[in-house]
Amino acid sequence: IDIIRRSIQERRFRVWYQPIYCCHDDIFCSAEALLRLNDYEGKPIPPDVFIPLAEETGMIGELTWIVLEEICRLLSSGQVPGLKTVSLNLSMQQLLDPGLADRIQRYLTEYQLSPDCLKVEITERFLLHDVLYAKRQLASLTAIGIQIYMDDFGTGYSNLSSVLDYPFAFIKLDRSLVIHVPEDHRAELMLRTLLTLFHSLGKRVVVEGVESKALADYLKHCGSDMIQGFYYAAPMAKEELIAFFSQKNHPENRKMDA
Ligand code: C2E
Ligand code: MG
Ligand code: MG
């Protein structure tokens, strides 16, 4: 907790980005912003360790604005060829902040960005006592034009009733759901059924944690909208992201890949 507090003051947090591949356009068009922090010996502290602590101590709010500001800087710089959208992870707890939508809108206005270039990812790590209030908050985000992703579908935190309860435009399928695809016939059947279900509900699907070519090819074939995972790229610093998108989205390289 002390490291988190000091690191906010000393601006030691870094924002990395993981490229997301868009199957329909056959191009990398998006990225997820992910926080990074090293301890004072230079050893990385995993987000799964510092994010829950930041949530418990209320520091997650400040961290979110650091990430949003970096995203806005990146998008408004126009330095990343083909990058149309970036997603920001929000804790369910932050949905209790009545000023959330206004504050996000202020950043977008300041950086002259259209709301459709920012996506918000939500996972239900916290049981919300006030579902109606959370719904209103998400509605206020969609009202200003920001689309919402349900993160980590299939992990126990993100479930089917929430798909109906909240206005998600995208569902991100957790890696645990696809880890045995395509070898395991039952896992394959579940994936195809989920894709059909979500598409019928008017949602688009991102599959996370894709580590192999076999799985990426299978996902393209069965109608996944977007793919994210180490097969394509791990999270990376901004400079590497610029180089990655410049190389992968270059028309000559895309022709060669095809
Ligand atoms: P997440 O939002 O589900 O982010 C995806 C996580 O999966 C990232 O872990 C990413 O590095 C990892 N990942 C991506 N592709 C693969 C793959 O092919 N295989 C495997 N095994 N893993 C893959 P990371 O960066 O350690 O973040 C963990 C979690 O911490 C995130 O899960 C998110 O819930 C949280 N987090 C990270 N940054 C933020 C933030 O700025 N705000 C909030 N509220 N939470 C954040
Ligand atoms: Mg996420
Ligand atoms: Mg996720």
Image (tube, rainbow, N blue to C red):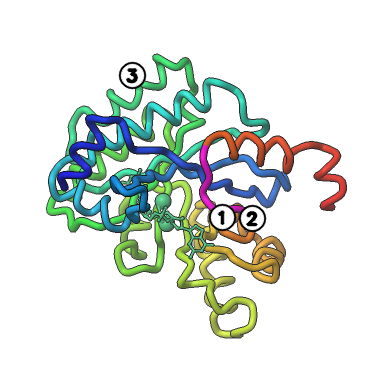
Q: Nearer the viewer, mark 1 or mark 2?
A: 2
The spot of residue 70 in percent (x, y) is: 42, 29
Residue extending farthest to the front is 41
Say which amino acid is labelled 2.
Tyr
How far apart marks 1 and 3 lie (CA) works out to 29 Å
Please tell me whether mark 1 sits on a helix, a strand or a loop: loop
> Magenta segment range?
233-237
Q: Is residue 140 left or right of residue 29?
A: left
Q: Which residue is mark 3?
A: 106
Q: Quadrant of ligand 1?
A: bottom left
Q: Is residue 174 left or right of residue 211?
A: left
Determine which quarter of the picture holds residue 85.
top right
Q: Which residue is mark 2?
A: 232
Give the vertical position of 170 relative to 139 (above or below). below
| Pointer 3 or 2: first along the chain | 3
Q: Nearer the viewer, mark 3 or mark 2?
A: 2
Q: Is mark 1 within 8 Å of ligand 1?
A: yes
